[in-house]
Image: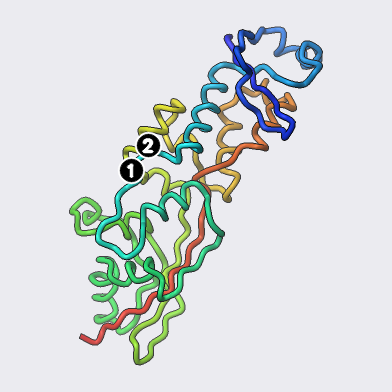
Amino acid sequence: MKAKGFWKQENGEYLPHPNCKCHWEEKAKKSEGKHQNENNNNRWEIIPEEIYNLLRGLKNIWENKIPKPPRSADHSGSWSKLTRMCFFEEGPNPIRFDESSPYSRDIANSCSIQAEVKAYYKKHNKMPPGWNFTGPKTATGELGEVEWFLGSYQIENVRTDTRGIHFTVYNVSSWHSGTRLPKSWTDFIRTNTGFEIYDLVTSAPRGETLKIKLRSLIPNYLLQFQWVSDILAHLPSFGGDWTQYYDVVVKWDD
């Protein structure tokens, strides 16, 4: 099996071994000691080519942050930026947006709130427990990027005053959000790694997604080596669960 090397820097980061012409031999599977003796300076290690290509592809994704994020529609908030924050696990977790936030205002004016949630409130004189991003409307174009980003969400902490109805939209974006990424993003991931997005992400805490999935992709005989564990430990992650709260106020006296 052909292999590439990874250069281990002083800070512990692994980079491609310069001008590597190394090959992974079957005997390395049987003897970890011999593998280590051949590299006793601990400056580089051998890694199979398919794993090398996968890690290089992942590195390219993190560095480029995926080209051409989706363009925000006529909204106050930058939902493309929020998509990036969600997928690349940037920002605090959980995160909360108050009523003055452009994201909270966009949710208040969204189709799901103004049409279905509002209709439910007028009919039952109470707020529904939540809203589900399902059914034929997902393909009609009636729903916008707010619904696309949030998917299903819960409604809690409902109260009323002279300003209107106040409530909190609660959502946990998980690996299902990764499967809803724009086609340009999923194509970029496929081209660079050879994997579909759902092969690389799973429902897991932030920082753990890729570590969990890559263990299932790396051959078992490689997992015994410490340098493999070191690579997995230093990998950043994407697509982890992200908890969001949006404090929303809507005036429904018309």
What residue is shown at x 52% (from left), y 50% (from top)?
A: 89
> Badge 2: how crowded within 10 Å, few (<14), some, or many (20+)?
some
Q: In this view, does 159 lie above or below 241?
A: below
User: Percent position (x, y) of residue 213?
Assistant: 55, 36
Rendered view: 29 above or below 244: above
Q: Do the residues labelled 1 and 2 touch (CB within 8 Å)?
A: yes
Asked if residue 109 lies left or right of residue 156, the reply is: left
Give, as a three-letter code, the residue at label 2. Thr
Mark 2 sits on what residue? 186
| Residue 43 in the image, given as x and y percentages of width and height | 74, 21
Label 1 to label 2: alpha-carbon separation: 7 Å
Place of residue 48 in the rendered image (x, y in percent of width and height, measured from the top left): 60, 17
The coloring applied to the image is rainbow
Q: Which picture quadrant has residue 68?
A: top left
Q: Residue at x 25, y 66 (%)?
A: 111
Left/right of residue 144 with respect to residue 161 in the rendered view: left
Q: Is mark 2 on a helix, strand or loop?
A: helix
What label sits on residue 182 in the rendered view?
1
Which three-letter amino acid code belongs to the residue tagged 1?
Answer: Pro
Please name the residue shown 43% across and 69% down the image. Answer: 246
Residue at x 72%, y 26% (from the top left corner): 227
Q: Nearer the viewer, residue 23 or 225?
A: 23
